[in-house]
Image (cartoon, helix red, strand yellow):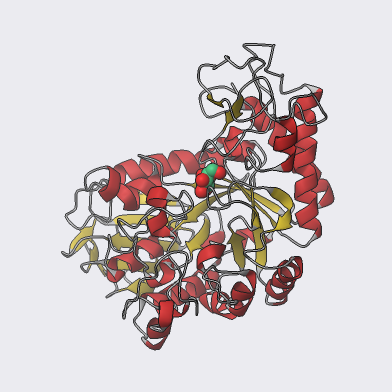
Amino acid sequence: MANTWLKTAVFYEIYPNSFADDNGDGYGDLKGIIKKLDYIKSLGANAIWLNPHYDSPFMDGGYDVRDYFKVSSRFGTEADFDEFIGAAHAKGIKVILDLVPGHTSEENADFLKSAEATPNDMYDRFIWTRGEWDFPQGFKAISGRHQRKGNYIVNFYSTQPSLNYGFNRVDDPNWQFSYKSDEAIATREWLKSVMRFWLERGADGFRVDMADSLVKNDGDQGDKPATSELWRNIRAMMDEEYPDAILVSEWSNPQAIRAGFHADFMLDHWGNPYNLLVRGEEVQDGHSYFDIEGRGDAAKIAESFSEWYGKIKDDGYLAIITCNHDTPRLGGFYTHEQLKLIYATLFTLPGVPFVYYGDEIGMKYVKDIPSVECGFARTGSRTPMQWSLDKNAGFSAADKIFLPTEIDKAVNVESQSKDKKSLLNFMRELIAFRKTREELTARDFEFMHAVGSEPLVYRRGKLVIVVNPLKVKQIAPVTLAKNDKDIFSVGKAAKIKKDGIECPPLSFTVFECK
Ligand code: GLC
């Protein structure tokens, strides 16, 4: 791979609305982020993923882009953006932006032009049927909102019209273009112009929203051959023009790496390793590995993780999240002691760590708050960052803020910074430890023991890692040499015995083996 920085990157995901409000209008902004760069650095993170910062009517938290070439005035000026990139770089922090390639906002000027009654140069930039009564099967089509004769396809919400990257299988040539057509290629080239615009301004790459959604009728096994071809074309442009820039896909399928992405997120999809490790409580009735009652199954996790990792091979990275802006936070479902075990496990598996803002202090998923900007259930994971016990938890001086903040004595940066044993300080130690051991960013990896809720044991080069998720002592049936040393632990370190490794309750230990 052309670039090397991704290998040792630790990302911090920032949802800009919610991080730090500098101008006191109740929304987070770029100036606020600039003031917190030292904090991000103190965590050990050396990269930021910024959720959409573009001009938007915010009908989907900014994933509905009105103007791809403009910073949302909510977040600051164009100069603030440039200052943010410059300040981050000066501190050795890379910044990747959120690229939303599949759909625009319904207020996007190109879309509005495509919706006019008479044909024009934007007519085929979006996907329109040719008759007002055409409601094609398998697509969400919106009707009756514009003067153009026909209905348009949307990707996610009704406010997000799909851009036209064409179809792989063309069922109705009256309105479906081949993905090889000039019209589809023109959209791809427009996307490149968006990317170049931000890369020229200093961005270090993109997290790519719904990366697999571009070409329609494109296979059904997750392989998406035409969409993959499109991304390989874009990757070739990047390798040539911006060889240090990276692409991280929201695809959650090893296919994404074959499509040219440098890394792909392992998302919280039902039954995948992340989900089986930590999120079973939500969707599978208490079957995650970290379930305190021991109802999880490490075997399933090892099987699916190994399959996934095996498919990626040396071609790219797995992006491993604590959580994200679409997923219920783990805080509140687990105690801080459990979160330490969870983060330690996630960040010693092979992959690139992504800390979602606030997860490092164990911010809770806030249940039952009214939806804002179409966050719906996701709103509870997007509440403002908890900096202190001050007004609005130190997030903003405004009297009215866009989402209520939780004021929690134990869950804020100021209190946890003072407490040596806090989750925040543990996170700092964990990331620092990860940096000292080359094995943790190398490829070498294997599961050594993965059975039910017994201790999970895996090897990273010379390091052997042992996790006990239960409140009771357990023995892992893995033999290590007597003088193999424990070099990092959560809770009391495990001990090497004749019949295996004796793990104290709720413990995580890294051994260095000869
Ligand atoms: C992605 C984003 C999500 C957004 C959706 C539509 O899944 O992460 O927040 O709503 O795409 O763009």
Is 285 on the left or on the right of 366, as rendered?
A: left
**Residue 185: x percent and y percent?**
78, 29
Question: Where on the picture, by quarter, is residue 12?
Answer: bottom right
Of the pair 350 and 464, the residue shown nearer to us: 350
Image point 55% across, 60% down: which residue?
A: 441
Q: Residue 66, can we see it?
A: yes
Q: Position of residue 109 (x, y in %)?
A: 73, 42
Q: Looking at the rendering, in which quadrant would you find the C terminus?
A: bottom left
Please count the marks in the image: 0
Q: Where is residue 310 drawn, in percent x and y? A: 50, 40
502 vs 170: above or below: below
Of the pair 187 and 276, the residue shown nearer to us: 187
Q: Nearer the viewer, residue 418 or 146?
A: 146
Q: Residue furthest bottom?
A: 418
Residue 492, position in %: x, y?
27, 75
Q: Is residue 109 left or right of residue 287?
A: right
Q: At 36% across and 69% down in the image, what residue appears?
A: 362
Residue 149 vs 74, above or below: the answer is above
Residue 70 or residue 425, whichever sits in front: 70
Q: Is residue 505 left or right of residue 444?
A: left
Q: Does any portion of residue 13 appear in the rendered image?
A: no
> Looking at the image, which residue is at 73% across and 31% down?
114
